[in-house]
Image (tube, helix red, strand yellow):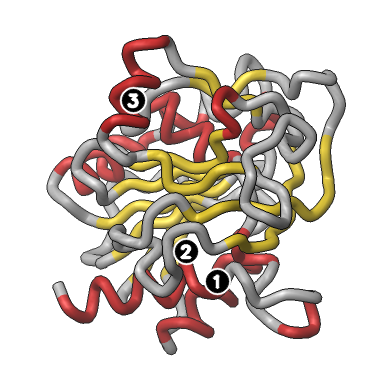
């Protein structure tokens, strides 16, 4: 699997993401600087978490207009797999690759803790190593993770099965107390209509090895490897 990580000023999870990609796929990713205008030939593009451009204007707003993003959008529209985590999710909404927006957390506080996610579907290139209803533990670290979409968009996401992860309790129930940021319908991760672009707020790359306290996030990376090997 050939992969690339897009790096913006202020991003701080690129090394975590590179570790996860190499662990799952056996090959180190290429790091691509935001001022570049073209990505190398790759099977997977990742936009990692952090605070691109210090989160000025809106989280992801400046990064979404960086030179490299024109090629990211073009390759996504051509079918290349794209994963955006945390700030990467925000960047993907800013480019229009994913619908909706990430707003300030409901309690207006930065949140950094482990959360539980219910896998809504295993029929994606990002979740085929899980089963639907599987509850996994991953960390969150964000101040603007409150997902919002207008009623029509929300209906399409839910109706088309494009909500991939939902904040839930240990029994898989999407309760209000399990929702760390106020996201509508407890949404933690969504797909584009084609199914090749995933944005999610939690950080699966930080739960891939036993030393991290959980390996629940590794399945996302193993799923992408498996999907790309059989494509």
Q: Looking at the image, which residue is at 34% across and 20% down?
A: 155
Q: Is residue 202 above or below residue 93?
A: below
Dot label at residue 102: none
- Depth check: give the residue in front, 104 or 1: 104
- Between the residue at mark 2 and the residue at mark 3, the CA separation in whole angstroms equals 23 Å
| SS for dot 3 | loop
- Which part of the image, by quadrant, shows the C terminus? bottom left
Dot label at residue 96: 3
- Depth check: give the residue in front, 161 or 196: 161
Q: Name the residue under label 1.
A: 18
Residue 88 visible (yes or no): no
Residue 44 position within the rendered picture, expressed as x and y whole percent measured from the top left? 32, 63
| Left or right relative to 112: residue 86 | left
Q: Is residue 105 above or below residue 16?
A: above
Q: Quadrant of residue 122?
A: bottom left
Q: Looking at the image, which residue is at 80% across and 76% down?
A: 213
- Between the residue at mark 2 and the residue at mark 1, the CA separation in whole angstroms equals 9 Å
Dot label at residue 31: 2
Badge 2: few (under 14), some or many (20 or more) residues near its Cα, within 10 Å? some
- Which part of the image, by quadrant, shows the N terminus? bottom left
**Badge 2 vs badge 1, beta-carbon distance below 8 Å:** yes
> Tag 1 or tag 3, which sits nearer the N-term?
1
Residue 172 position within the rendered picture, expressed as x and y whole percent measured from the top left? 62, 52
> Tag 1 or tag 2, which sits nearer the N-term?
1
| SS for dot 2 | strand
Pair 2/1: label in front: 1
């Amino acid at each position: 699997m050939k992969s690339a990580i897009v790096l913006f000023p202020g991003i701080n999870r690129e090394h975590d993401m590179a570790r996860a990609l190499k662990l799952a796929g056996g090959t180190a990713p290429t790091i691509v600087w935001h001022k570049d205008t073209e990505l190398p030939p790759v099977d997977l593009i990742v936009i990692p978490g952090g605070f691109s451009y210090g989160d000025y204007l809106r989280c992801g707003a400046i990064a979404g207009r960086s030179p490299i993003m024109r090629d990211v959008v073009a390759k996504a529209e051509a079918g290349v797999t794209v994963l955006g985590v945390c700030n990467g999710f925000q960047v993907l909404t800013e480019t229009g690759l994913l619908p909706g927006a990430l707003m300030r957390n409901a309690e207006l506080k930065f949140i950094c803790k482990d959360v539980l996610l219910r896998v809504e579907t295993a029929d994606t290139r990002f979740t085929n190593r899980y089963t639907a209803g599987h509850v996994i533990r991953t960390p969150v670290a964000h101040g603007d993770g409150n997902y919002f979409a207008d009623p029509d968009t929300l209906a399409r996401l839910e109706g088309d099965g494009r909500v991939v992860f939902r904040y839930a309790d240990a029994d898989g129930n999407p309760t209000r107390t399990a929702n760390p940021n106020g996201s509508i319908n407890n949404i933690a991760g969504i797909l584009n209509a084609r199914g090749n672009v995933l944005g999610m707020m939690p950080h699966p790359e930080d739960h891939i090895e036993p030393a991290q306290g959980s390996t629940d996030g590794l399945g996302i990376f193993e799923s992408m490897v498996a999907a790309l090997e059989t494509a």
